[in-house]
Image (spheres, helix red, strand yellow):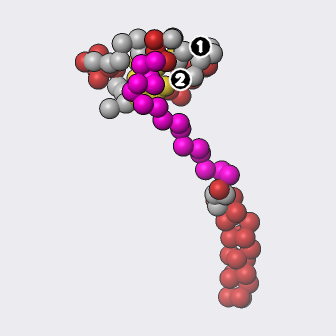
Amino acid sequence: MKRRSVLGALAVLAVVAPAFAQSPAAKPAEPPRITVAELKSLLAKKAVVVIDVRQVVAYEQGHIPGSLSVPDVDKQIAALKGHNKPVVAYCS
């Protein structure tokens, strides 16, 4: 009886474990980083959308000129895609 329980548990693990294992391909890619000089150049060309992902209070206390306050990116992702430009996100 005990042997059946152990075998049953192993069978469940054999089915469930792969679902929780992360393959190297499943890991999210590191977002590219840019320098301040690169950001200034892109802003001058109006080639990017800059978003400030901090809370609204922090944004109101100071932010990069021209940046948009987007504290909840998940809710506003569709609007960001509408700009048809690369998005640069920053926080403190």
The answer to whether residue 71 is seen in the rendering is no
Identify the residue at image location x=65%, y=50%.
26
Residue 67 quadrant: top left
The span from disc 2 to disc 1 (Cα, nearest Å) is 9 Å
Answer whether labels 2 and 1 touch (C-beta < 8 Å). Answer: yes
Asked if residue 91 is positioned above or below residue 46 in the image, the reply reads below
Are there few (<14), some (14-19), or many (20+) residues within 10 Å of tag 2? Answer: some
Q: Which residue is mark 1?
A: 83
Residue 61 quadrant: top left
Tell me where the magenta segment starts and ends, as one range.
25-41
The answer to whether residue 7 is seen in the rendering is yes
Left or right, 30 with reference to 50:
right
Whole-percent x, y for residue 14 in the image: 72, 70
Identify the residue at image location x=54%, y=43%.
30
Whole-percent x, y for residue 31 in the image: 53, 38
Whole-percent x, y for residue 20 in the image: 64, 59
Q: Which residue is mark 2?
A: 87
Q: Amino acid at mark 1?
A: His
Q: Quadrant of the C terminus?
A: top left
Q: Amino acid at mark 2?
A: Val
Callout 1 secondary element: loop
Residue 57 lies in magenta, yes or no? Answer: no
Identify the residue at image location x=57%, y=22%.
86
